[in-house]
Image: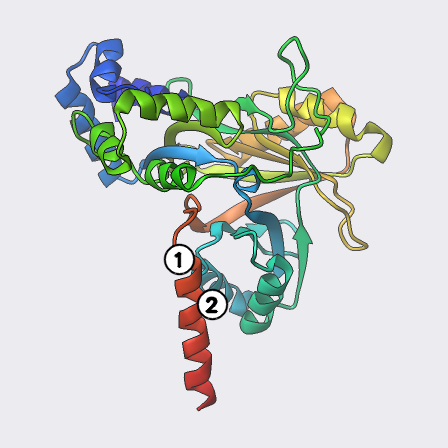
Amino acid sequence: MDQIDRKLLNAIQSGFPLTEEPYKELGNDLEITETEVMERLGELKAQNVVRQISAIFDTRRLGYKTTLVAFAYKPEQLNTGALFINRHPGVSHNYAREGSYYNLWFTLAVPGDGDLEQTIKWMAEETNAVSYRIMPTIRFFKIGVNFDMVKQKSDAHNYNPDGGNPDGGNTGSPTPAWNQAVELSEFDKSIIRELQEDLPLESKPFNPIAERLGTTTSKLFQLAGEFQERKLMRRYSAVLHHRRSGFRSNAMIVWKVPPERSEEVGMIMAENSAVTHCYERPTFPDWPYTHFTMVHATTEEGCEVIAEEISKSTGITENQLLYSTREYKKTRVRYFVEDYEEFWETETASAVTQSD
């Protein structure tokens, strides 16, 4: 990977150009040809450095239910359990982590008419999990991974679905609608189904999408902008494989924050450029940690330095660093497709076969 590759990766993370000839525009910025841009991206995809180029949507605003889940397994059952959980189409992130009693952490989304808690209970029973905790988001402070491939450090888009104050900063205070689904037309859903797929490496990649939708590319880009204004779509960009990009260590740092300082501390944490995600989540008798921050670095020592910076800036000292030891799954949830129905049909058929 040379310097041009690194600059290209930075460009497609921060905001992929929604134009008729996006690869040409990227090439102009980097002073290389459109063909070379596509060739370089093809090679980066082959190396699994670039996972996907597509839209990133806000799950809840689309009417889906979602949560973080922590499972505890006996060491010898962890791998089998994780692979079983991977099969569910609503599981987008699934990591083995060390540093706590709970050793498997995953995110799960189900359609609005799905039963999130029953699905998790079924997963636990099917995989012989020792115990589990459901940890939905109480408050967002920050979402947005961005790996600076030139400086080799993690940075972030300060996207906050809770909204912001008039001067452009984020208050962290939830608005009444932050966790509510937006009414979507069938055409809206058709656009989402198209934009969530990986963008092909061809000169005018949006033209076939517009044609399938029966519209023009200019109208498609206009609608994408409206999706962002409605907070349905966070951005259109690339997702990188952090380990293959050189960021071989990532830690979910959990913090015990007093209730009266929740918002203040959350906003300070979000201001740290190395923090890519920052949430407040519920506590339990065996889990006193309220705030979750995700950080990435080239080494574990780098993650520890970031944790120390956060501790100094907030005055919060009670924390745990949960390092990922294996990535079982990382993808984007596909919305308004038949994956969920097909999954449950397969599982039902399998259960009937086993009972026979």
Q: Which residue is mark 1?
A: 339
Say the numbered circle drawn on residue 199: none
Left or right: 105 as drawn, with respect to 26: right
Which amino acid type is marked by label 2? Thr
Q: To which quarter of the image does residue 26 belong?
A: top left
Residue 261: give x, y in percent of width and height: 82, 28
Q: To which quarter of the image does residue 129 belong?
A: bottom right
Left or right: 295 as drawn, with respect to 346: right
Left or right: 211 as drawn, with respect to 181: left
The answer to whether residue 154 is seen in the rendering is no
10 Å crowding of disc 2: few (<14), some (14-19), many (20+):
few
In the image, residue 152 sits, relative to residue 132, either above or below, namely above
The residue sitting at 24% across, 14% down in the picture is 25
10 Å crowding of disc 1: few (<14), some (14-19), many (20+):
some
Q: Which residue is mark 2?
A: 80
Residue 351: give x, y in percent of width and height: 46, 80
Q: To which quarter of the image does residue 162 belong?
A: top right
What is the C-alpha distance between the residues marked 2 and 1? 22 Å
The residue sitting at 71% across, 28% down in the picture is 266
Frontmost residue, 87 versus 306: 87
